[in-house]
Amino acid sequence: MKFREKASALVLCAVLLGTSIVPVSAANKDEIVGSNRYDTAAKIADRMGNYDTAILVNSDKSLADGLSASSLAGKENAPILLVRQNSIPSETLSRLQNVKKVYIIGGTAAISKNVENQLQGKAIQRIEGKNRIDTSEKVAALVGNYDEAFIVNGNKGEADAMSVAAVAARDKAPILLTNGNSTNQQKRSGVSYYVVGGEAVVSSSLVNKFGAVRLSGSNRYRTNKVVVERFYANSDKLYFTKGDKLVDALTVSSLAKTDGVVFVSSTSDKSILNNKSTLIQVGGMDKSIVDSIFENEDKVDKSSLVVGNDYAEIMRCEDFPFEQYKIKATDIDGTDITHKVKWIGTGGPDEKPLHEIDTSVAGGFPIEFYVTLKDGRVLHEPGFLAVGTDLNDEKPEGNEPSTNINVNSEAYQAEYRKEFYKLINEHRVSKIVQPLTPEYGLERWAYLKSKHMADNNYFDHKYNGQMIDDMYPNEGGSVMLSGENIFYSFGRNLTAKEFAKYSFENWRESDGHNRNMLSSSYNHVGVAVYQSNDGKIYATTDFGW
C-alpha cells in the first residue's frame, strides 16, 4: 500500500506542571462603580449575564440578614440586589424584569409586604428567622447538602462573614452565624468547617466542637488576607472593595466567587494585590486608595516575549509556521510588537551557533525567537522546528511494513514500558539524576490519556479544560500527576521496543520534554501507547512525586 497522507517524523507537546514563567506586566484596571449602593449592585448583576433568580437584601441599617445570603446566591447563580424597607429602587427594579424567582432575606421589619407586592407574577420565597442567627440556619437548610461551612460571630463578625462571602458563593458553603460561644448546629460528617475570626470573637469551644480550622488576623484586613491567601492563592484576578462599608463585598460575592475579594483602606496592607493581571474596583472609594494600589503601574517594565508553544512542525518546503508557536510580544510600555519578532536557527548538523534553516531538508532544528525593544534590549526565547516529509515519498511501492503488530495489546504495552523505562532511567543516571520508579496509577492515566486522544482525535494535554486526572480522578494510584509528555506518530509500523526508542529520542531532542524527563522533582513515572482506527499511535508519559 502507499501512504497517501502527510506525516512528519515527530509531533510533540510538553507541559511542566507546577512551574511557570510569568512576564512582569501592569495589571488591567477595571471598575464596577454605580452612583449609589443600589446602582453598584445592579451593575454587578449586569456582569453576571443571564439569570432567572435574584436575592433581595435590605442593607440600609445593617447587613444582619444579608450576612448568610452569599451561599444561596452561589447555589442559585443569582445576583444579590438591594432594596429599601418599603420600596424597590429603580436600579434594582429594572434588573428584576426577567426574573422568575425571588428570595427575600429577612422578615417584614427588614423588607415589607409593599416590596413583595411589587413583584407580582414572580415566585417569591421569604427566608426569615426570629433573629439573624436563626435566619442563617434557615439559609443553610435551603442550601442543602454541603461539604464546607463557615462559622462566624453573627453579632460582631460582619467583616469576617463578608471575608468568606465569595468563597461561600463559590463552594455553596453556608455561613453559620453564632453568638460566638455556642450554636444549635451540630457537626456533620464529611464537612470541613472553618471558624472565621480570632478567639475574642469566636471561642475555642466552637473550634473544638466542629474540629474547625481557624482563619484570623489582628484586624479585618488581615483576616481577609488570610482568607484570600488560603482560597484564592492562584487567582490572577482580584476584586477590591472598601473594608469599612461591607455592602459591596456582599453584592459582588456571587460575581467574584472564582477570583476573590480583597478589603482595602487608606492604611491597609495591599501587597496581596501585587502582580495580578486584573484588578477590579467595586463601589466608590477615595481616589487616594485607588491611586495607592496602582501607584507604580507607570513604572513597571511591561516588556515580554512569550512563546506559548515551543514546538511546531511543517512539511518540507512549507512556509515557517509562525502562528503555531502562539507568540506574544510587548514593548516596555505595553505596546504589542508581536509583528517584530524574528527567528533564527541555533545549532544543528552544521554546528553554527546562528544560521538560517533550509526547510527543504527534513529534520529537527532548535531555533530562537528574538525581538528588539525600544530601549535597545533584545528578548530571547527558545523553540523547536520539526521539518517532516510525505511518507509517500519515502516508501517505495511494494516495500510495505508488516501489519500484524497490535499496538493496543497488553503484550505490546508491557514491552513498550519495559524498554522505555530502561531508556529514560539510563538517560537520567547519565545526567546524575535519580532513576524513576514505575507507578501503576500513572501508567493507568497514561493509557487513558493516549486512548482518549486516539478516540477523540485531538492532541493536547487538556480536553474541555481538563487534564486526564481531572477526567478520571479515581483511576490513579497514590501518586499525584505532576508533569506530562505526549507524542504521536503516523505511518510507522514499529515493534514495541522500536517505538519506545523512537518516542524517547524525539522527546529527548525537545527541550521542554527533556526537562520533564530529567526533572529531579519527579520520582515516579507511567507510560502507555494507543493506536487509533486511522493508524495514529499516541504515546503519553506521566510523571509524579
Image (cartoon, rainbow, N blue to C red):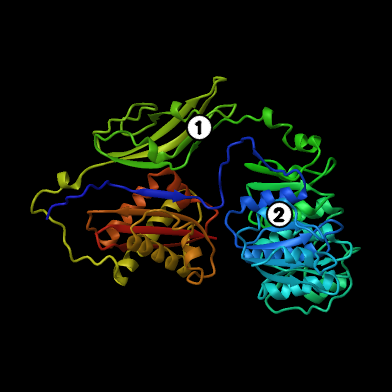
Against 127, residue 256 (above or below) is: above
Q: Amino acid at mark 2?
A: Thr
Graded by Cα atoms within 10 Å as few (under 14), some (14 to 19) or many (20 or more), the crowding at tag 2 reads: many
Name the residue tied to disc 2: 92
Q: Position of residue 72 (x, y in %)?
A: 69, 66
Against 158, residue 107 (above or below) is: below
Name the residue tied to disc 1: 329
Where on the picture, by quarter, is residue 500?
bottom left
Q: Amino acid at mark 1?
A: Ala
Q: Position of residue 94 (x, y in %)?
A: 66, 53
The quarter in which the C terminus is drawn is bottom right
Front residue (pair 172, 131)? 131
Q: Position of residue 374 (x, y in %)?
A: 55, 20
Q: In the drawing, does residue 240 fall left or right of residue 435?
A: right
Q: Is residue 201 visible?
A: yes
User: What secondary structure is found at the residue carrying circle 2?
Assistant: helix
